């Protein structure tokens, strides 16, 4: 089975209680653990689409990542806007090895084959406070990273021609009046039909763009899902 959950916002080593954002976040780490263990088996895979830990560096994020590592299944993680602890692939690999973190892999300029699905993705970006030149630069950079991931997916598909490419992002590609045309163009050109994303909180189903030019989009923020991983396949 393949699942997705984003915005776990763990803070075992930092003073960042999420219940300041509302009662829905009460004891959220324990609720994630309970739902995860009830849902996910060791042979399953869970994509965590960003905002994993409030830690500012590896030291602060260590307990959060060890907690995720201890949960059942294989985890594939990607960066969110609050993942300040995130580092280069080599540094993360070394950190995982030093801390016996052996069930977590990183989705970053690459792709993974999972059963009959090819998993691609990037963090993305959204102009939340008006368009600035810096936003445009970041959007172009994130589109480039997504294309690297999609190209890696195309390579995997050569030996798995029936595999569907699914994209995971932290930011939505479409939300309200915002459309990330650079990202949407790539999704359309590479034939992606499903995108899973996080970042959004305190939103209602009717506020979401669930489909755009034939591309279906699913919000997987943990509070939106009631802290239970969403079954993809």
Image (tube, rainbow, N blue to C red):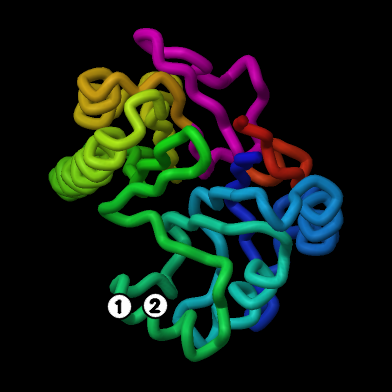
Q: Residues within 10 Å of mark 1 (few under 14, many from 20)?
A: few
Q: Nearer the viewer, residue 129 or 219?
A: 219
- Residue that numbered label 2 is attached to: 93
- Coordinates of residue 215 in the picture (x, y in percent): 41, 16
Q: Secondary structure at mark 1?
A: helix
- Coordinates of residue 16 in the picture (x, y in percent): 66, 71
Quarter of the image with the N terminus is: top right
Residue found at x 20% / y 40%: 151
Residue found at x 35% / y 9%: 213
- Measure how far apart labels 1 and 2 are at the Cα level: 5 Å
Task: Please report contact status of discs 1 and 2: CB closer than 8 Å, yes or no.
Answer: yes
- Coordinates of residue 212 in the picture (x, y in percent): 40, 13
- Is 205 located above or below residue 137 in the figure? above
- Is 82 located above or below residue 182 in the figure? below
Quarter of the image with the C terminus is: top right
Q: Residues within 10 Å of mark 2 (few under 14, many from 20)?
A: some
Q: Can residue 231 be seen at all in this image of the molecule?
A: yes
Residue found at x 34% / y 74%: 87
Left or right, residue 24 beside residue 202: right
- Residue that numbered label 1 is attached to: 90
- Tally of numbered discs: 2
């Amino acid at each position: 089975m393949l699942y997705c959950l984003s915005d776990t916002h763990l803070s075992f080593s930092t003073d960042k209680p999420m219940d300041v954002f509302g009662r829905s976040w009460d004891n959220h780490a324990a609720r994630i653990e309970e739902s995860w263990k009830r849902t996910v088996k060791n042979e399953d895979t869970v994509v965590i689409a960003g905002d994993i830990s409030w830690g500012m560096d590896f030291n602060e994020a260590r307990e959060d990542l060890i907690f995720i590592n201890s949960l059942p299944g294989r985890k594939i993680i990607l960066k969110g806007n609050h993942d300040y602890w995130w580092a280069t692939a080599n540094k993360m690999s070394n950190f995982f090895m030093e801390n016996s973190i052996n069930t977590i892999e990183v989705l970053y300029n690459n792709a993974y084959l999972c059963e009959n699905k090819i998993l691609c993705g990037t963090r993305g970006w959204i102009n939340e406070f008006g368009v600035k030149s810096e936003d445009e630069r970041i959007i172009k950079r994130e589109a480039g990273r997504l294309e690297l991931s999609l190209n890696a997916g195309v390579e995997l598909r050569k030996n798995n021609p029936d595999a569907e490419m699914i994209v995971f992002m932290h930011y939505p590609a479409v939300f309200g009046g915002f459309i990330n045309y650079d990202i949407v163009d790539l999704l359309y050109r590479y034939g992606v039909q499903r995108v899973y994303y996080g970042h959004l909180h305190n939103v209602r189903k009717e506020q979401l763009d669930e489909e755009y030019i034939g591309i279906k989009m699913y919000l997987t923020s943990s509070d939106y899902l009631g802290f239970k991983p969403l079954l993809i396949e």
